[in-house]
Structures are given as C-alpha cells and as structure tokens.
Image (tube, rainbow, N blue to C red):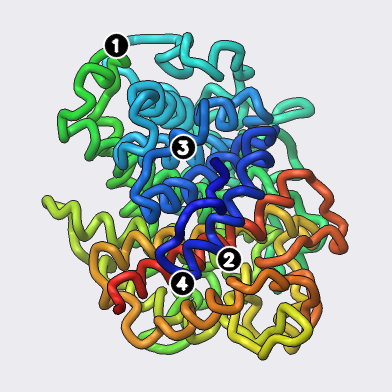
Amino acid sequence: MATSQRDASTPFLAAADRLVDELLPMWEGSNNVWRAGWVLDTLVDYFMARGEDGSIIQNPLLPVSPTKNGDWWDDFAWVGIATLRAAEMGIFPKQRNELVKAAINAWTYMHGPGWSRKPTNLAFPFKDLEGWQDFDPSADRRIGAPNAWANIRDTWSPGEPTARQIGERKPRYAPGGVWNAPIRDPYSPDVVAANPGCTEADVALAPIQNTVTNGLFAILSLRLALAGAGGAYRDLFEAADLNLAACQDAWTNQWSWFMSWIYDTYGEESLALTISPTRFLVRERVSTFHEYEGRRAWDGGYCSRLAWTGDQGLLLGFLREVERAGGTMPQRGTGAYRLIVSTVFERAYAPRRYFGSGAVGMFLLPWLRLGDDNPYGTSPPGGSDYGDYQTGNGVFMRYLLQAYRADPTVVDGYAPLVIGAAKQMTEKSFGESVYPPGCCDAYVSIDQCGDHRPANQMTPLVNRLAVLLMAHEMTSGEA
C-alpha cells in the first residue's frame, strides 16, 4: 500500500506520506551510497513518526552498499550512522543484525588499522555482508581517515613529497581530526600563505579536514562505542573482534580536537564563527595547518564567513550526545549546542515564497555566508557543488528532532519557524515557483545551477520531509 493511501493523524504526516511515496523508488534505485545513507537516516524518523517498521522496504541494505560509488571516507560514516540507528530503533527487525554489521564495517573501514583486537590485514570484518562482498578498496583507502597525513609519502603523486610539502600539511591539532580522502598530490590540500578570504572558486574539495567528516566520524564512533558497551549486540561485536577501546579513543580524540578548534583557536582561524558572546556557528572546515618554518599555511578553500547548515546539525548531535553520555570527559563546551541551535534559527532563516499564491514565509538556508548582500545567490565551497551542500537542512532538522525528543526546551521560542514552514509544505503546489530565486535553496531542484546528478532529485524531498516530521513531533500532542 502506498503510504499516502493511509489515514494520517496530522496534515504534516499526510504531506510526509506523499513525499515518501515519491522518494522511495529514487532511493532504492540510487547509485550514490552517501546520499542513500543520508536519506535512510530521515526514513528512520519517518517510520518512528508513523509508529511502524520499515517493512514496505524489502532490502534496506542494497541502497547503502559501498559498491555504489563509495569513495571519500565520510561516505561510510553516513552509512554507519544510519544503519546503526535503524537497527537500534527497530525499524527493520528482520535485518537487525545485518544493519549492525554494516555499521561496524563502515566504522572499521573509516578508522583504519587498529580497529581489531587482533592483527589483521582486513579493511573491515564482515566481508560476506550483502552489499559489501564486492567492495575491495585500494591500498591508499585502507589507511583510514585519521591517518591521511601520516601516510602522505605512500599516497602522494606524482613522485615523492618534499619536506616542505609534508610539513606545510601537517594537522594543527592531534590526536583527533580526520581527513575526507587520502593526500594524493601537491594540489590537495591546496595550501596558501595567508587567509584566502573566501576566494575559493575551483579549489579541490578533498583531501581536507572539514567539519562534516569530523562530525560524522565523531558521532559514529560515540554511538558505536555506546552500542558495544551496552551489550545488546555483544555477539556481533565479538564476531567482528572489534576493538572497543579504539572506538572510545576515536570519539574522545574527536571531542578534544573540536574543543581545540572551537575554544583554543581564535579569530578567523577558529572553527567557531562567533557572532556574539552567546551566538556562534561552526565553519565549514578548519583554517590552518601546523606551524612549519615559523608560519602556518592556510587551506586554500577556507572561507571564514561560510557555515554549512549540516555541520550545525552534526555539532548539535555530537555535543549533546557527549553530554548525555557522561563519564569522565571534561564538560567544556557541551552546552554550546544550544547556542548553535539559537544561532541557526536567528541567522540562517530567510524570507521566501514557494508558490504563486502563497504568503512569504521564513525558510532555512542550506548554507550561509555572513555579510553577503544576497543570501539566496551565494555559492557553496568550490563554487559549484550545489547538490551535496543542499543536503544540509535535512541533517540539521534530523539532529534537532532527536534533541527535541530528549528535551523540548532546545527549541524554546523557535517552534513557530518550523511549524510555519511546514504548513506551507503541506500545500501540493509548494515549490512550483520560488521568489527570490537563487541556488542557495534546500527545498526545490537545483538543476538550473549546473549540478545534474540523479541523486540531487532526492534532496529537496528529504529536506521537506525532515521539516514536516519536526513539525509533526512539535504538534502531535495538541488537541
């Protein structure tokens, strides 16, 4: 039965049903693993809102197979986070063990050597898992996201890197900090002598220590460590010979790395894009490398005014979940997730109209360049990667929903923004016309912006779905 043929308890859920009917065939036929993982995480929220399992999906593992263009290391974190959460929420009870295995595979591959309690040459433990049997990563992909710089001599091309090329790219803070790809050649990361000042057009997007890859690895490591300690999947963790101490170290190192970049680094070099003493966002990537011969090189793609909405969701999730995990971790910075939430609502919403007869509403932008006169016309990093960066709204709303379920006060004062946008999204004509126009838009196709990848067709559907699910949660207790 199509989801839209069922009774809906709210207009928000009815609109969500229609979106899921349109989305599922795209998702099941997708050939983009990280986008499929990104979609799956919001589908988990949908089935939770419905109070149902995901039995309308025959095989949730196939869309998130790494053979579907799994390449950069952050691709695997999207898969691991979504599959572990689907298992923990009981969305696909028949595939529960396989989903946990997929999460373990994703983390071990991303972590690299040391993931196992025993010496092994395997990149991940469950080689026979459906969707993973034919995935055979190259040698430079087996080193793990935390180890890209340490293995720079093995991955650099052409030729051997010089001492300067190595020294200028050394990470500023360690341990902690991961890369989204191996360091292959002298053009990536593109190092420059001074702050590039947001002139990053045509700069490569990998390898870098960007916020998204680090936030994803932090969340996956934390959640997997907690799952392993909880014992519910003991047989699977034992079968994997998973080194839970390495998992614990991974997220605590990520915590320290984020704290160093946010609180121990200042001005335009800080990961914190400070707006006021009580308002800040996190920037899209880190700014500088370790000091070499008396100076620090800058990442040539760095823009101190740029914040991706998805990164705000990832830091909201990680900081909040560290706080809930407790233990002996220092608590510096944990409450900062509330400041991030407030800043997103106060600075990243802009007025827009999405259908001809509709009123102007306030809608969340997928990225923000502070100081630009036209927020609708700003470009993402590199100047052309609109499709990937359009996904930010789905990420933020997903982690906001998880935070709201744990503590509704996290959105005190801001619920009207979410509900107002969701009400407009219940209209079937939503998205037929957009004003003001511009490619910085989360809720309609960005084909006109030159990014024509098939996976992009899923993005506005999921972004709308995430808003509708948030509004449904906020209003489901109302008479």
Of circles 4 and 2, the one toward us is 2
Q: Are marks 3 and 4 in contact (CB under 8 Å)?
A: no
In the rendered image of this protein, does residue 147 appear above or below residue 119? below
Could you say whether the residue bearing mark 2 is in a helix, strand or loop? strand
Answer few, some or many: residues within 10 Å of disc 4's Cα (few below 14, many 20 plus, some between 14 and 19): many
On the image, numbered disc 3 is attached to which residue?
Answer: 146
Rendered image: mark on residue 431: none
Mark 1 crowd level (few <14, some 14–19, many ≥20, 10 Å Cα): few
| Residue 114 seen in render | no
What crowding class fits label 2: few (fewer than 14 Cα within 10 Å), some (14-19), or many (20 or more)? Answer: many
Image location of residue 8, percent across then percent down: 45, 61
Amino acid on which disc 3 is placed: Pro
Q: Are marks 4 and 2 in contact (CB under 8 Å)?
A: no
* Amino acid type, callout 1: Lys
Q: Earlier in the sequence, mark 1 or mark 4?
A: 1
Cα distance in 3D space between marks 1 and 2 = 39 Å
Q: CA distance from mark 3 to mark 2?
A: 22 Å
Type of the residue with mark 2 = Trp
Q: Earlier in the sequence, mark 3 or mark 4?
A: 3
Q: Earlier in the sequence, mark 1 or mark 3?
A: 1
Q: Decide if residue 332 is in sight here.
A: yes
Q: On the picture, is 37 further left or further right than 122?
A: right
- Image coordinates of residue 155 in percent, x first then y, are 65, 27
Q: Earlier in the sequence, mark 4 or mark 2?
A: 4
Residue picked out by circle 1: 118
Judging depth in this view, the residue of 246 and 85 nearest the camera is: 85
Instruction: Read off the residue under disc 2.
Output: 308
Q: Nearer the viewer, residue 171 or 134?
A: 134
Q: Say which residue label 4 marks.
A: 272
Secondary structure, mark 3, is helix
Q: Amino acid type of disc 4?
A: Ala
Outermost left residue: 327
